[in-house]
Image: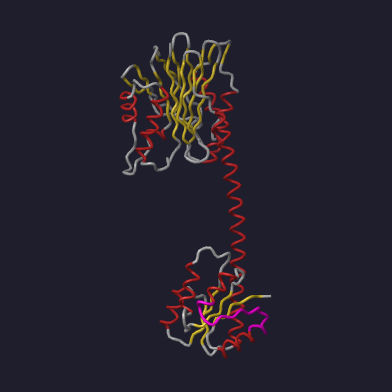
């Protein structure tokens, strides 16, 4: 049976309306004033229709309506009809501002009352339908979040562990913009003499970028990076990827790929649209490279590689543009020059504390605001 709360201080009017509502099929609960009605509403959570007089002692109809609207944790919407002898425009405005849904002039026309109540029930049913849809949307959203968290866990599992491969020490910073990142990197043994490394940054953010970064990662891992136990030239690896990933997911990516000779510290690499890496020797830091085209943007491109020499204690830093283009609250970029200065200022720190310092500086730069792009930095140092 439909339930309604009737709030009316006049006994005769309350009796007539109660009988009328019962004849309409309602289960009627009555109250003599707003204060009593409020106590009933707090005890009976299934009441969704309230028919209330305006002028009453202790708590009038306007105050009751305002009290109902102020409470945030109702299980469902309460439809409020205000009974009043006031028929002027100001009274209607006052009632609407208090949160009333509808009005009926006293003395009440019973046929009009029935129609207004039916309209209220339709509104309540629409609210229930909307709430059900919201719950379904929330469930779907929660499932998406769970899936993204799983994807983020998978992506983290693909990242190499900080540490040494032979006499080369590796460490990194990895801060995804959201759950998953379009940035990816790796370092690995090509053979007993050479180590391979790369970092890539897929254009855009979110799932589509992350999917492409996953795909490129697996493609590199499963590529033939050696020819007769000699590393394939980095420019040839990049050229092959550029041809393979033309218009892939309507996206492109920047990257650096290279290899390290563990015996003599020689590094050979190709830059494809990625930010200029930084070579640090002692207290001196220098930008290397001249840009190049991103991978997957244009077909039939030619890439070039360049070499540099790592002595014991020398370091090399590769980073995504999320580092140097990190914006502060004044819309100022962190910049290459600031990163270079940091690497020179803290050159005496070992690799892991140095990267923690850079991470802290970036967070301070953002003033603890979440990053608006993936922030990735890969560093390696030649050790004894």
- Quarter of the image with the C terminus in it: top left
Q: In the rendered view, tell whether residue 118 sits above or below residue 10.
A: above
What colour-coding does the image apply? secondary structure
Q: In the rendered view, tell whether residue 270 sits above or below residue 90.
A: above
Answer whether residue 32 is magenta in the image.
yes
The answer to whether 225 appears left or right of 261 in the picture is right
Q: In the rendered view, tell whether residue 279 sits above or below residue 137.
A: above
Where in the figure is residue 324, as x and y percent of width and height?
A: 37, 33
Where in the figure is residue 239, as x and y percent of width and height?
A: 51, 23
The answer to whether 285 appears left or right of 88 in the picture is left
The residue positioned 47% from the left and 84% from the top of the image is 55
Please state the extent of the stretch shown in magenta in the rendering: 21-36
The foreground one among 271 and 319 is 319
Answer whether residue 30 is magenta in the image.
yes
Image quadrant in which you'd find residue 1: bottom right
Where in the figure is residue 218, as x and y percent of width and height?
A: 59, 27
């Amino acid at each position: 049976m439909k339930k309604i709360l009737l709030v009316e201080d006049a006994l005769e009017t309350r009796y007539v309306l109660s009988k009328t509502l019962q004849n309409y099929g309602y289960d009627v609960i009555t109250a003599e004033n707003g204060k009593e009605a409020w106590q009933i509403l707090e005890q009976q959570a299934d009441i969704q229709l309230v028919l209330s007089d305006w002028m009453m002692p202790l708590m009038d109809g306007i105050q009751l309506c305002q009290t109902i609207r102020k409470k945030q944790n109702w299980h469902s919407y309460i439809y409020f009809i205000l009974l009043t002898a006031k028929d002027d425009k100001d009274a209607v405005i006052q009632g609407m501002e208090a949160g009333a849904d509808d009005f009926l002039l006293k003395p009440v026309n019973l046929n009009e009352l029935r129609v207004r109540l039916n309209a209220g029930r339709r509104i309540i049913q629409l609210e229930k339908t909307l709430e059900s849809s919201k719950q379904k949307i929330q469930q779907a959203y929660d499932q998406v979040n769970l899936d993204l968290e799983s994807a983020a866990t998978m992506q983290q599992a693909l990242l190499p562990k900080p540490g040494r491969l032979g006499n080369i020490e590796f460490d990194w910073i990895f801060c995804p913009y959201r759950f998953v990142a379009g940035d990816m990197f790796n370092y690995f043994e090509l053979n007993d003499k050479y180590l391979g490394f790369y970092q890539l940054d897929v254009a855009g953010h979110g799932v589509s970028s992350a999917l492409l970064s996953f795909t490129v990662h697996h493609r590199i891992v499963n590529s033939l990076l050696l020819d007769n136990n000699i590393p394939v030239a980095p420019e040839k690896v990049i050229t092959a990827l550029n041809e393979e990933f033309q218009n892939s997911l309507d996206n492109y990516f920047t990257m650096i790929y290279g290899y390290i000779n563990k015996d003599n510290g020689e590094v050979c690499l190709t830059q494809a649209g990625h930010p200029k890496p930084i070579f640090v020797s002692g207290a001196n830091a220098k930008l290397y490279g001249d840009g190049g085209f991103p991978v997957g943007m244009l077909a039939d491109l030619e890439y070039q590689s360049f070499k540099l020499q790592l002595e014991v204690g020398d370091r090399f830093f590769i980073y995504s543009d999320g580092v140097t283009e990190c914006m502060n609250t004044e819309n100022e970029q962190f910049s290459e020059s600031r990163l270079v200065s940091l690497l020179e200022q803290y050159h005496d720190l070992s690799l892991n504390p140095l990267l923690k310092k850079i991470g802290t500086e970036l967070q301070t730069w953002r003033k603890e605001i979440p990053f608006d792009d993936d922030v990735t930095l890969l560093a390696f140092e030649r050790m004894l």
